Image: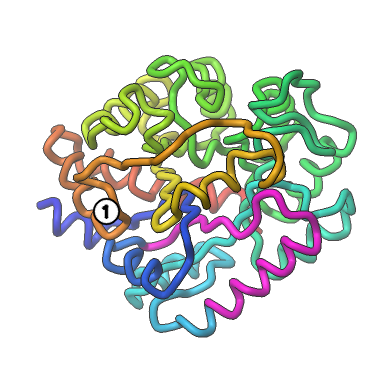
Amino acid sequence: MPARLHRQATVIDGLIVSKWSRSLFEAMHAGGLTAANCTCAVWEGFDGAFRHLATWKRWLTKNDDLLLQVYSLDDIARAKREGRVGVILGWQNSAGFDEEPSFVPVFHELGLRVVQLTYHTANAAGSGCLEAFDAGLSSWGHELVAELNRAGILIDLSHVGSRTARDAIRVSKQPVAYTHCAPKALRDHPRNKTDEDLRAIAERGGVIGVTMFPPFMPRGNDSTLDDYLDAIEHVIGLAGEEQVAIGTDFTQDIDEEGLRYFTRYKGTGHALLEIGNVVNPKEFGRIEQYPNLTAAMERRGWTETRIRRVLGDNWLRLFGEVWR
């Protein structure tokens, strides 16, 4: 049953930020991924974000036997039909827009489909979850939310401060997402979200992608696949199974030195987080092991409907509401 279900289901990862390479794309294909939100900018401003996007365009062309760029729901269906992996291009920071609203539709035309407002710290749009003081959504942040809504780009609040996130949820005319987060109730970590935060997303029709990133899990590097399912079930209990999905935050093939880029201010400054070496659960330690996740869900006695929703159908519903 799990092997059949995994093959037939639409499997979407809400966020992967790994060391991109041909072997990584092969791992995504081997894992049976239908599509994934692939990070193509983190700390970068306009120039760096644009260059990374251009690099992705080259990768997509060079690896078109494995990959297909996603612009719409039709492309996700096509990826599934053709046995390729749909690449959803996403930013984990809005700095790439350089506070210029006219850039938003331009990047949308290039295929940008998910944008996180802030990454850890404050930027022109608002405050991150590790900022000393969360001032909420700025004037530019309000304008940016409106522009992202207008363009049909999904707003991500995973690394955003609680007050800024609440402001964005309130003013957005479309549902928003936590593409990759874990519940604070299971581990009191500044990157994790309170039950109240999680409910706020769900109440407006958004989706919560639950991460298995070990530093955010209750037992850290000792966490198992069952611990990950416990976290998913906790969020389902709060938000309902129609609002919960997968957002692994896989950092495959990135070494400890590479991870420091994500945990230091603008990549090279002072440390924002100390996470050390990251060890994923052995049953789900690599992207190619994705079928093990589906099998574990089945062992839990989840219905096929719930499994399909969490694996990808909930992302499909949200994308369909937001994307133009």
Instruction: Give how far across and how far down residue 35 sits, in percent.
Output: 43, 61
Q: Which residues are magenta?
A: 34-59
How dense is the environment of label 1, judged by Cα within 10 Å: few (below 14), some, or many (20 and up)? many
Residue 148 vs residue 93, the one in the foreground:
93
Residue in the image at 34% along x and 71% along y: 26
Is 171 placed left or right of 169 in the picture? right
Is 96 placed left or right of 316 in the picture? right
Residue in the image at 78% along x and 49% along y: 95
Q: How many marks?
A: 1
Is 98 placed left or right of 39 in the picture? right
Instruction: Give how far across and how far down residue 236 sits, in percent.
Output: 36, 26
Residue 67 vs residue 281, the one in the foreground:
281
Residue 44 part of the magenta-drawn span: yes
Rendering quarter of residue 253:
bottom left
Is 40 placed left or right of 45 in the picture? left
Q: Is residue 84 above or below residue 249?
A: below
Residue that numbered label 1 is attached to: 290
Residue 14 vs residue 45, the one in the foreground:
45
Instruction: Give how far across and how far down residue 258 sits, in percent.
Output: 52, 52
Rendering quarter of residue 205:
top right
Amino acid type, mark 1: Tyr
Rendering quarter of residue 165:
top right
Residue in the image at 63% along x and 74% along y: 55
Q: Is residue 256 above or below residue 302?
A: below
